[in-house]
Each structure stands twice: as C-alpha cells, then as structure tokens.
Amino acid sequence: MIRELLESRAGEDYELYARTINPQFVRVLRTIGFDRVWARAEGQYLYDRDGNRYLDLLGGFGMFNTGRNNPRVRAALVETLELETPGSVQLGVSLLPGLLGEELLRRTPPRLARVLFTSSGTEAVEAALKLGRAATGRPRVVSAERGFHGLTLGSLSASGDAHFTERFGPLLPEFAHVPWGDVDALEQELRREDVALFLVEPVQGHGVYLPPEGFLVRAQELCRRYGTLFAVDEVQTGFGRTGRLFAFDHWGLEPDLVTVAKSLSGGYVPVGALLMSERVYDAVFDSLEHSVSHGSTFAPNDLAMAAGLATLHELDDAQLVERSARLGDHLLERTRPFLEQFDVVRDVRGLGLLWAMEFAEPQNGSLAWRVMERVRTGLFAQLVVVPLFTKHRILTQVAGYDLPVLKAIPPLVLTEADIDDFVDALADVIGKATRPSRVAGLALRAAKGATWRRPHKGDAGFARGSDQRSVLESRDAEVRSELA
Ligand code: PLP
C-alpha cells in the first residue's frame, strides 16, 4: 500500500506539505533552493530523485549516529514486528524494556540505577524536572544561558535562549539561568539550598560551546555540597557523538540524572529515556500508590526498545564511538588551518563528531560585513550553508538562530574521504563568499532590504526547533543563483 501511494503521488512532496502541514517552511526551503525531492537515504548519504548523492552532515539533527537506514536496526524492527510481541499491555510488562534498560545501565556509572523511557528528548527533560522536584522537595531549577533542552514548556523554561522562549510565555516559575561556565554564579544559586536540579548539556549544542576547563567537575561538586541533583542532558551528545559513549565520560562525571534520546533508536522510532539514581527513584516512586508517578502511553513500546538494543550493539560492533573520536580529530586537524587561511574564520572547535566553525568580521570589506550582520546576525554562516548544499551537495546547518557559526553533526559512519570532500568544498565556498565584491554586493542588497529579513510573528516555519529557526529567509529568488 505504501509503495503504491508513494509511486502514484511522487513529486507532490512540497505542494502537499505546504497545503496540509506548513506552507511557511516550504516557502523557506523553496527560496533557498533546498527543495529537493528526496528518493532514498543510506548511511551518511541522501539521494535525490535525479540520483544525485548528498553528504549529510546534519544527520537529522543528530539522530542517525549509526547511519541512515542502518540494516541491523531495520532487521531488529522487522523481526519484532513479525514476532507480534505483546508490548504495551500497560497493566503488565514485557521483556524488551527491561533488556534495553539493562544495556543502558551497564554502560553508565553505578550511580545510575533506574531507567524511565519516554518518546522524545524533551519528554526526558520534562521527566527530569518533575522527578527532580519531587525527589528533593525543592522548587527551583538552574540551567545555563544559551542552553537548549527542548520545546515543551518545562524544557523551554530551562532553555536559556530568548529566541526560543519569546512569544510563548509565561514560562514555568522558579527557573534561573547562569552564564555558561560560571562556577561562582552557579554557587550563588545553589547556596540557597532550594534548587532541585542543575540541568546542563556537557557541550552546548546550540553554537557547539565546549565547557570551560574544570567547569563540569566543579558543578558536580557544588551540586553534591548543596543537595542539588546534577542532571546532564545527553540528548544531543550521547551515543558516541563526542568520541565517548556519553560526553560525561570525558570528565568521569557521575550525574544523578541523565537524559538521552535522538540516536538511541538509530533514528527509526521516537524514543528517549531518563536515567536516574536509586535515590531519586526511591524518593518519587515511594509506595504502591506512587508506582506510576510518571509515564506516557507509548513509552516504552517494543519497537523503540528493539531499535535501541540493535543500536547499542551496532555502536559496539562497528566501533562507532572510537570512529567518532578518530574522525573528529581528523576533521579538526583539516579545518584548524582555516584560522590562518581565512580572515573571516575566528574559531574552529569540536569534540568527536560535534564540530563548528565560527566566523567574525574580516579585515577586508569590513563595512560590507557590518551592514550584512546588522541586517541579520549570523548571515555570513548562511552564505556558507547555502552553496555547500546547492553547489557541493553537502548538507550542513547554522549552529543556532542568529549565530555566525557553521555546525556539523554527521552520522558516525562517514569516512575520512567524506571529511576531505567537505574540507575542500568549505575552502571553495569561504574563499568565494569572502571576496570583497561578493560581500559588498550582498551587503548592498541587504541594506536595500530587498533580500533578507528577520523572521517575524507570522513565520510559523521558524517556530519548530532550534535548527529550523536558523534557516535563511530570502525574499529574492535571484539571490539563490548568486549563492549557488
Ligand atoms: N536536549 C538537547 C540537548 C537537545 O539537543 C534537544 C534537541 O535538539 C532536546 C533536548 C530535545 O529533544 P527532542 O527534539 O527529541 O524533543
């Protein structure tokens, strides 16, 4: 049935999506020339209907660590469907959730003793907020400025970036934010001894900011001293992304709460989980009456559990965590010379295969740069993302709304040759984008207001997520050819 449907309606993708789901988002994709009709995907590649291959350095926002359409994960799903397993009895349990719970706990520090499954990252964060408050009997939550934890109201209240929160207030009460890496500010908050949890990404995905030396270890110590739960959000950094299975492994941390999602199911099935200490579990699920204090209908379901088990085995067998560390080093090694080569490159950073390049005002054509950035901060990074895609067939993203940062978060199965192709393409694109005439031309258009504009209230296409919000909006189709 699905095959016939797909064949009989082939090519209607964008028109149908615009009519039934989100016309603004389709408008954005069309304007910047990202409106490819995708035919299939495999590993680190996407193929359009003309058979062109694209290197996917966006990886579905980091959910394809084991590669798109991974055969082992697919086989586990097919097998589970064919077994007609008796999952989601609700008043009863099945074996698969326990098996995945066991595998997750086997790979994490002994302090983590229980798993609560969810169906997404933001739900795992919501669970951490709820259970953290109940376990400590404290109201407050502290997180880091510029952090991102999801788009439901609790997670949004913890997210420290106004671009995501404006228009959706009032947010939940009793949330505070401290500057990233500021131990003193954190201690000031925790000293009040009314903070249930400190929620932190080990590497901030929005902008790819690595933690300052010693910050996370010190934060954990402070949490222990003041009776606050130390909650690490590994939704983006988990499952090998940073070259260790979990990013907290880099610093030997032992959190009380850990959130995971994205790549846990190999990208096939929605899944998430909150890993928690026995102390947290015991404090919340403290009686028969409280045995179902938190949960949701679909979590855990057998398909997500089977996909999770297969994904963990694939990460082990294909040695993808080690591969992430090795290829991440290669990517840094090849791109750090850009700091010398291009005036416009201010920083190159990364951990494993979570990589970013930050741009700043160049010496030549600085007036043009300033005009361009005044119209829209981060515009230069968009000028890199668009031709990387349209000319070199490489899918990347800007690392967050209004940031002049290019980001890569590819499937961990990519090769050294893929990285080398990316580096060559990047050199070509940055070289062209920084030609004074090009920058001046674009700045002029920007100044005239005919080309770029900030998203506004009606732009529903910008409202879904951190990554979509960064998509370039252009009114002028002419610009597409200029960028190509
Ligand atoms: N936490 C972090 C660190 C994330 O990067 C994200 C998503 O990008 C989330 C939470 C939310 O996850 P989801 O999109 O599955 O709700």
Image (cartoon, rainbow, N blue to C red):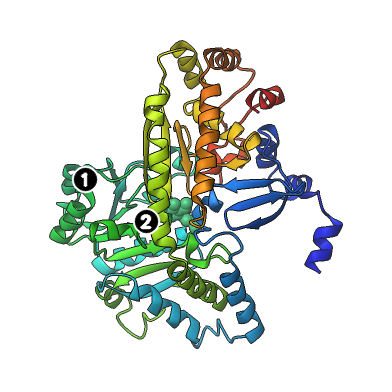
Which residue is at 55% across, 28% downward?
429
Percent across and percent down for residue 357 are 42, 35
Q: Residue furthest right?
A: 8
Q: Answer with the quarter of the image where residue 282 lies.
A: bottom left
Instruction: Give the camera-side residue of 385 and 284.
Output: 385
Which residue is at 37% across, 44% downward?
350
Q: Is residue 14 left or right of residue 229?
A: right
Which residue is at 52% across, 67% downward?
265
- The residue pinned by badge 1 equals 213
Q: Secondary structure at mark 2?
A: loop
Percent across and percent down for residue 93 are 48, 86
Q: Is residue 151 visible?
A: no
- The residue pinned by badge 2 equals 243
In terms of sequence position, does the residue under pointer 1 or pointer 2 come before the other? Answer: 1
Instruction: Give the camera-side residue of 103 and 317.
Output: 317
Q: Is residue 430 visible?
A: yes
Instruction: Give the camera-side residue of 447 and 61.
Output: 61
Percent across and percent down for residue 15 are 78, 45
> Which three-letter amino acid code belongs to the residue tagged 2?
Gly
Quadrant in which the N terminus appears: bottom right
